Amino acid sequence: MGIELTSLVDLYLRVSTDKQVDGYSLDTQKAALLNYCRKAQIKVYNIYVDAGVSGKSIENRPEILELLKDAKNGCFGQVLCLRLSRISRRLADLLHIVELLDQQNVKLHSLTEDLQTDTPVGKLVFKMIDAVAENERRKIPRT
């Protein structure tokens, strides 16, 4: 699933802790996404950031909710994230978000996971990746 040059892209960043590890810090995500857009000459509509918010639910995530509202209003044609786990670590929520975006003809593109959610195989891989992310979230110690 490639980024179309004709539409605006929205960037979404999320970390669940102030010191996110494994290269998912807000700065790392933002730099990678902006660098990709710059090289591909893609215009960015907005950057939505949910900092210090768990990916286990879309509740209490004001930026993802704002993103969905803007998608409904036709503000952009694509959402770009570093990894699908940044959008959600809960399969049901991720599927719901993708469905809402699809209803508005907004594509979801992960910079590191090149998936086509409009094909049967793409949908299967998409669900498997998010199921792994959900499992990883369950292993995070609760504080």
Image (tube, rainbow, N blue to C red):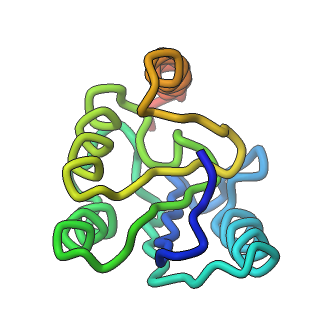
Looking at this view, name the residue that lies furthest to the front: 6
Front residue of 53/42: it is 42
**Left or right: 18 with respect to 131?**
right
Q: Quadrant of residue 26?
A: bottom right
Q: x and y percent of residue 116 in the render?
A: 53, 35
Front residue of 140/28: it is 28
**Left or right: 84 with respect to 34?**
left
Identify the residue at image location x=36%, y=30%. Answer: 90
**Which part of the image, by quadrant, shows the N terminus?**
top right
Q: x and y percent of residue 59 in the render?
A: 20, 50
Front residue of 127/135: it is 127
Q: x and y percent of residue 38 in the render?
A: 76, 81
User: Is the residue 75 above or below the residue 89 in the image?
Assistant: below
**Which part of the image, by quadrant, shows the C terminus?**
top left
**Left or right: 85 with respect to 114?**
left
Front residue of 34/121: it is 121
User: Is the residue 129 above or below the residue 26 in the image?
Assistant: above
Q: Quadrant of residue 74?
A: bottom left
Q: x and y percent of residue 32 in the render?
A: 76, 66
Identify the residue at image location x=53%, y=41%. Answer: 84
Identify the residue at image location x=22%, y=58%. Answer: 104
Identify the residue at image location x=19%, y=50%. Answer: 103
- Disc tally is 0
